[in-house]
RNA sequence: GCGCCGGUGGUCUAGUGGUAUGACAAUGGCCUUCCAAGCCAUUAACCCGGGUUCAAAUCCCGGCCGGCGCACCA
């Protein structure tokens, strides 16, 4: 069994994720997260929400997944998602059929044609395959649209699409969100939700699917404000992440032979200009810390900069967070500068204002040429054309005020030249006070593919070691994201041990901890069951519990045990202790130092594995278990640099 | 979408033109005072459709699903 199939087998068997609707043969690109997977995914989402929204003071919205067609006309997805492909019958190479037509003819917008017409044009002009030169005249043109389409309401009058990214559901609500943010830039709006892309070829389990979860943050910033540290409310807190280590794979290194990474820090990357946009640098910093916190192996992680040709239609600078999964680098997050593209487009297409009013420090007095036409003259004189005359006068006043110097002014109205006495135009240079201006914010967008983050956390958590001579496989999941936090077992289900353990499990659940009660089989078997799904601690009720009001806690990673108090008259104490453990407020080692009286329970402990790996349970140190090399691919020989999308 | 390979209990797997092997898991019971392996029992499978054949899980065709490669990944 390969590592990959072993991982898939574990995911399926233990209910992390599996193909959806297998009873009906399954459907490619759709997965169901089972009980443990749903819990793990939710914990990752909660951790994201805590770090990127709550702690940043940003807001969260929850928009619809279906939007009417005009939204995606404006966003650009309708055009760029709708591609016509033609495949060479000889060499098998695929090409953009519309591009071939445009190259062979003087047509510039072949993209707008139907597939039949493009196929005809290719036949008419006897277009050849750019790769091998074979004739494409008989090849068929196929269309694929990566957006799922639907109809809103009965009939086909209102086409709609499932959103291909959650972001649009934020952009289209910009006016209300800006109002809610009291028109103060910058402000951030996040969303965790489903997005849909009708992928041609879904692959690799949950890595490339047709329905997926995104966690996106759209930060709206003032395009004119310089990030210089002068305004703590407007600038990224670069000082807070200055020393965060970054593994960068910038454009220059990708083009160079060596494939070298740049090991640097946030502060250094900014000062050396490796990262252009300070906000991007900031997010790379807090995201790197976050990835490590939730258990990504930072030795299998890098930030790769998009090459110019790779940038999306909206982006100017973009970095991908990539994790090495199954020997391939997979994009798990994109950090993009989207500029004012989205808001400008939605403003144009919707007619709504997508701007923020930015007051000047000092109101400015300006002189502005203006007209105040005498309608009692223009009305009778020009009849229904009078409004057009006024409009022409207003434009002229702004563009050519000197024209009003004479007795009369000549303007064009509907192609006819009219002379208007200046006296009736009410022309004057008026003095106005301008308090500020309307600006279209620019957008910084960290966009997380939650399913891929899930895949990375899952795969990077796999460990193998030997406990008491027996090989075991376990998941070193951070306590914060582990689907089950604590296994609760009676040593035997007799003499009241089971009852006591059930009570404890129940009281822990009341505290919001996920507790799994299990009295089946030997105690060792139960430990292994929890190890396999990454449960950080197991609590065992034994005979001493009945005598001395203590239970044992067993650490997943080291398989060592300590004895902690579990006073029956204070049921909350144990819950507090475990909640602290989950939150990282204490650690297994700290508890061992505090409570362990030297009475070793059983004789657990790893026989092999490094002794340096000293049971860190805070979960922040995802690298501590990296001595278990078993999970790497066989020689890594199928490594390529194919990235995700 | 194209090509190659594959699809047998929950999982992994043996297998032959005559409806199926084993293991693990699960469930019930026994045993067991802390790390999967003892004993008994039970549950449970040939991806779907068509063809050939007396008979198809097995051979053929198509589909679906999966893995890999190519293409695609706004």
Image (spheres, coloured by chain):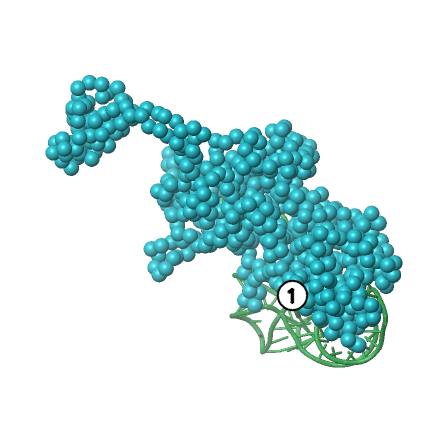
Where on the picture, by quarter, is residue A42? bottom right
Q: Quadrant of the C terminus of chain A?
A: top right
Q: Nearer the viewer, residue B31 or A404?
A: A404
Please tell me how crowded label 1 is: few (under 14), some (14-19), or many (20+) other residues with Cα within 10 Å. few
State which chain disc 1 sits on.
A
Q: Is residue A19 above or below residue A490?
A: above
Residue A643 position within the rendered picture, expressed as x and y whole percent measured from the top left: 60, 43
Q: Residue at image x 51%, y 50%?
A: A60
Observer able to see residue A80? no
Residue furthest to the left in view is: A380
The chain drawn cyan is chain what? A
Q: Nearer the viewer, residue A223 or A119?
A: A223
Q: Nearer the viewer, residue A104 or A6?
A: A6
Residue A142 position within the rendered picture, expressed as x and y whole percent measured from the top left: 45, 49
Q: Is residue A85 above or below residue A152?
A: above
Residue A517 position within the rendered picture, expressed as x and y whole percent measured from the top left: 71, 68
Where on the picture, by quarter, is residue A522? bottom right
The chain drawn green is chain what? B
Q: Is residue A22 above or below residue A495?
A: above
From the image, tell me which residue sits under label 1.
Answer: A510
Residue furthest to the front in view is: A569
Q: Residue at image x 12%, y 31%?
A: A381
Q: Residue at image x 76%, y 65%?
A: A566
Where on the picture, by quarter, is residue A282? top right
Element marked by disc 1: helix
């Amino acid at each position: 069994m390969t590592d990959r199939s072993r991982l898939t087998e574990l995911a399926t068997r233990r209910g992390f994720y599996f193909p959806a609707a297998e009873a009906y043969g399954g459907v490619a690109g759709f997965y169901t997260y089972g009980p443990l997977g749903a819990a793990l995914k939710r914990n990752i989402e909660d951790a994201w929400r805590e770090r990127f929204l709550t702690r940043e003071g940003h807001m969260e919205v929850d928009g619809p997944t279906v939007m009417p067609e005009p939204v995606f006309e404006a966003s650009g997805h309708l055009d760029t998602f709708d591609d016509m492909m033609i495949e060479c019958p000889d060499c098998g190479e695929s090409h953009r059929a519309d591009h071939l037509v445009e190259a062979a003819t003087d047509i510039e917008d072949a993209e707008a044609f139907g597939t039949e017409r493009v196929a005809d044009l290719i036949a008419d002009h006897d277009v050849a395959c750019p790769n091998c030169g074979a004739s494409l005249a008989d090849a068929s043109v196929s269309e694929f649209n990566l957006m799922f389409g639907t109809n809103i309401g009965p009939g086909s009058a209102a086409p709609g699409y499932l959103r291909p990214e959650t972001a649009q559901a934020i952009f289209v609500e910009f006016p209300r969100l800006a109002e809610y943010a009291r028109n103060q830039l910058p402000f951030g709006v996040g969303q965790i939700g489903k997005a849909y892309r009708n992928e041609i070829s879904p692959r690799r389990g949950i890595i490339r699917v047709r329905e997926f979860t995104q966690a996106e943050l759209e930060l709206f910033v003032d395009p004119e404000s310089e990030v210089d540290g002068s305004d703590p409310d407007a600038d990224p807190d670069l000082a807070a992440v200055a020393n965060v280590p970054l593994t960068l794979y910038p454009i220059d290194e990708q083009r160079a032979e060596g494939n070298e990474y740049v090991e640097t820090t946030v502060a250094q990357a900014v000062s050396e200009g490796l990262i252009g946009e300070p906000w991007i640098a900031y997010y790379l910093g807090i995201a790197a810390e976050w990835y490590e916190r939730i258990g990504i192996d930072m030795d299998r992680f890098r930030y790769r900069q998009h090459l110019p040709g790779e940038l999306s239609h909206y982006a100017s600078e973009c970095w991908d967070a990539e994790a090495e999964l199954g020997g391939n680098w997979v994009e798990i997050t994109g950090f993009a500068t989207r500029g004012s593209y989205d808001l400008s487009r939605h403003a144009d297409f919707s007619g709504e204002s997508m701007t923020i009013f930015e007051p000047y420090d000092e109101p400015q007095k300006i002189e502005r040429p203006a007209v105040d036409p005498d309608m009692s003259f223009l009305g009778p004189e020009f009849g229904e054309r009078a409004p057009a005359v006024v409009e022409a006068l207003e434009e002229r006043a702004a563009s050519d005020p000197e024209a009003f110097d004479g007795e009369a002014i000549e303007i064009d109205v509907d192609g006819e030249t009219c002379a208007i006495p200046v006296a009736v135009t009410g022309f004057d240079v008026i003095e106005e006070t301008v308090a500020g201006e309307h600006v279209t914010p620019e957008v910084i967008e960290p966009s997380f593919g939650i399913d891929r983050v899930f895949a990375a956390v899952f795969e990077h958590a796999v460990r193998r070691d030997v406990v008491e001579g027996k090989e075991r496989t376990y998941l070193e999941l951070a306590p914060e994201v582990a689907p089950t936090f604590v296994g609760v077992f009676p040593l035997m289900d007799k003499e009241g041990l089971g009852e006591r353990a059930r009570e404890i499990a129940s009281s822990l659940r009341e505290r919001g901890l996920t507790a799994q009660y299990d009295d089946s089989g030997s105690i060792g078997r139960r430990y292994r069951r929890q190890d396999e799904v990454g449960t950080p601690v197991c609590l065992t009720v034994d005979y001493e519990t009945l005598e001395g009001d203590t239970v044992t806690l067993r650490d997943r990673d080291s398989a060592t045990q300590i004895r902690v108090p579990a006073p029956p008259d204070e049921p909350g104490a144990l819950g507090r202790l475990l909640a602290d453990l989950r939150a990282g407020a204490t650690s297994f080692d700290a508890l061992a130092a505090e409570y362990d009286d030297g009475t070793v329970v059983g004789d657990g402990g790893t026989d092999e594995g490094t002794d340096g790996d000293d049971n860190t349970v805070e979960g922040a140190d995802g690298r501590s278990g990296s001595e278990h090399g078993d999970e790497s691919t066989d020689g890594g020989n199928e490594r390529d640099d194919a990235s995700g999308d």
